Image (cartoon, grey):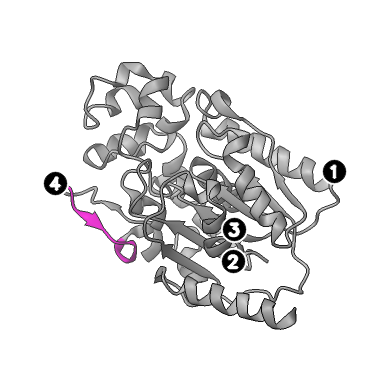
Amino acid sequence: MKSIALICVLLLQLLLLQTNVLHGSTIAVKSPNEQHLPVFVMHGFDGKLYHYTPLEQALKEHGFDRTYILDIDWGIHSIFASMETMLGHLSQTIDQYKARYNVTEYNLVCHSQGAVLCRTYLQSHPQHTAQAFVSLAGPHMGQFGLTGRVEHYLPLLRNITRQDVYEILYTHKVQSSFSVSNYWRDPFHYAQYQADVKFLPHFNNETVQANSAASQFRTNFVKLKRAVFLGSTADEIIEPPTSSLFEFWSTTSSVYEMVPMEKQEIYTSDLFGLKTMLKDGRAQVIQVPNVKHMEWTGDKTIVVLHVIPYLI
């Protein structure tokens, strides 16, 4: 049985080589016999419990018996609320789960909008005890593209181009009540984004006021032992898909011009600790081919190949 387990581990490592590790060195994984930390899972925009059941099952089948899907802001409650409100709920829920299940240290696996919430939680909570953070298709550099699900819940956007959506999403009323507006990053109206968007510019240190918090954000985030950011250019929901990998269109050009992570200020100025962790081998930014948005949590094979190896 030991030889079979060893062969399985070797095959898994070979398959992992098919991914495109854009930034960061290889992170050592635990052997199958080591005890794992609990896993807290945070869902994304319009998340339903059944979207995350395959992820939960895969984790438990591979030794992560203490996997808990955070019961917070499901469905419509993840849409018609501000990210700041949900960040408060996330903090409270993590504390409650830690007390309920006698958890001290833990892994965080967070999907889509939830990945942004988890990152900002880690940045803003100096007492967090997370050890590993795995981000699945999180729009960390923002969203600039409408999807059918967004238009379904805000139908007045259906006949508006994305270049004009900022006129609605950047209003105070929408900012206080529609989650996507809090990370809608229009590269052609960047100054207005900095001034009017109430969540992402702060945590990405894109405002003068936010820059004063950069040092504390960095100190809090680098407490992690491991951070892995996963994304795919096949993602049909995040726009641009490489926002998950800290790439985004230029905010100083009048045309669409993709700026790689290495030239983004969030990296060059190490505004929350990503550069620090990449350089000391505790972080990776990985592009995985041909993964659709909901496959990160709905396809158990993807979970086994591209999530489990990075947990502690």
Residue 310 against residue 193 in the figure, above or below? below
Tag 4 and tag 3, C-beta contact below 8 Å: no
* Mark 2 or 1, nearer chain start: 1
Give yes or no for residue 117 being in the magenta stretch: no
| Amino acid type shown at disc 3 | Phe
Q: Amino acid at mark 1?
A: Arg
- The label on residue 310 is 2
Task: In the rendered view, tell whether residue 97 sits above or below residue 168.
Answer: below
Residue under circle 4?
255
Q: Quadrant of the N terminus?
A: bottom right
Query: Residue 235: image x %, image y %?
Result: 37, 48
Identity of the amino acid at label 2?
A: Tyr
Q: Earlier in the sequence, mark 3 or mark 1?
A: 1
Q: What's the distance in space between the residues labelled 2 and 1, CA to CA?
A: 25 Å
Within 10 Å of disc 1 (Cα), the crowding (few <14, some 14-19, many 20+) is few
Which stretch is magenta?
254-263
**Residue 137: percent from the left, percent from the top?**
45, 50
Earlier-in-chain disc, 4 versus 1: 1
